[in-house]
Image (cartoon, helix red, strand yellow):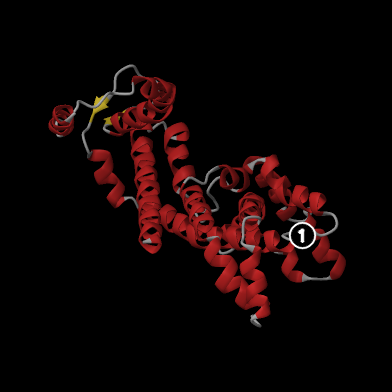
Amino acid sequence: MAYPMRQRGLLSGITRPRRVNWIAYLFMLPTVVLYSLFVLYPFVASFSLSLTDWNGADSVRTFVGFDNYVRLVRDGVLRTALTHNLVWMVVGSAGGIGLGFLLALLVWHRPRGFVLFRTVFFLPQVLGAAVVGIIWKLIYRPYKGLLYELGETFDIPFLRFPFLGETTTALGAILAAAIWAGAGFFFVILLAGLQNVDRDLLDAARVDGASGAQRLRHVVVPQLAPIFTLVLVLALIGSLNVFDIVWAMTEGGPANSTEVIGTYSYTKAFLESNVGYAAALTMVMTALAIGVSAVLIRIRARQEV
């Protein structure tokens, strides 16, 4: 019996070739094909367009190399649009997430009418950004809009101000509409996260004498940290890609005071027939979105270590 034991001991040190699980790769194949078709191919096609001078109609595309990217550096309107996107990232993201979190806290313990509140809070997401933009444009409408009528009825001069017609207030007016519309999306995600908060820890903190604000800060928020990272990434990417609501309300005006990269690239591509330059603008949007997402995920990963 000793010889087989020694034989097994000698054979146990031999490295066996790893078997490739081809079935797993077959299951992954549809996802890889769809990702390549709808993500990788458009990205490569957009980058190739950004290296050309093309009006979108001619069969010939003139290769210009990185001239469009050099032009980006000198473009003052692009700097204005980037500034507006940055403002949107800070104010829009903080406002939307903050309002969504507040609404989630209000219905966390399922008060009477919980289903109704949840439906009403999420309703703007069902309407869509373009529809929301049209609705709020009517609300802001001078002389006939809801705000103007309220100002006339209650004699409030501030409400009779043409918010979308002035360069100093147009961006803020659109941001207010966007925060109202986007809060419902964050509300649903954060409410789902609140359902998984450890109630035992909350009860223990309550017994120890922690106030509501202290329980929120030291018990609830830390447990929602991964959820906050998710919604923050989604909010920042959405801030970089914003287009629908701005175009529906002002089309980037007046005097570029609400211009963002999305509306500027649309103008260059479809109104000025400069598809190559518009493609370069979309590359800027993509690079910023990837960079912001990578930084946030990296920060979150370091916090979890």
Whether residue 246 appears in this view of the structure is: yes
Residue 9, x across and y down, in percent: 16, 34
Looking at the image, which residue is at 19% across and 27% down?
16
Amino acid residing under circle 1 = Leu
The N terminus sits in image quarter: top left
Q: Which element type, helix, strand or loop, lies under badge 1? A: helix
Report the residue that reaches farthest toward the front. Answer: 1
The residue nearer to you, when weighing 224 against 139, is 224
Whether residue 259 appears in this view of the structure is: no
Q: How many marks?
A: 1
What residue is pinned by disc 1?
A: 147
Looking at the image, which residue is at 43% across and 40% down?
265
- In the rendered image, the vertical position of residue 179 relative to residue 209, given as above or below: above
Question: In the shown orientation, is residue 109 left or right of residue 216?
Answer: right
Q: Residues within 10 Å of mark 1 (few under 14, many from 20)?
A: many
Instruction: Give residue 112's quadrant in the image.
Output: bottom right
- In the rendered image, the vertical position of residue 145 relative to residue 221, given as above or below: above
Looking at the image, which residue is at 40% across and 47% down?
289
Residue 88, x across and y down, in percent: 51, 57
Residue 279, x across and y down, in percent: 36, 35
Report the residue that reaches farthest toward the bottom. Answer: 209
Question: In the shown orientation, is residue 32 left or right of residue 4?
Answer: right
The residue nearer to you, when weighing 196 against 246, is 196
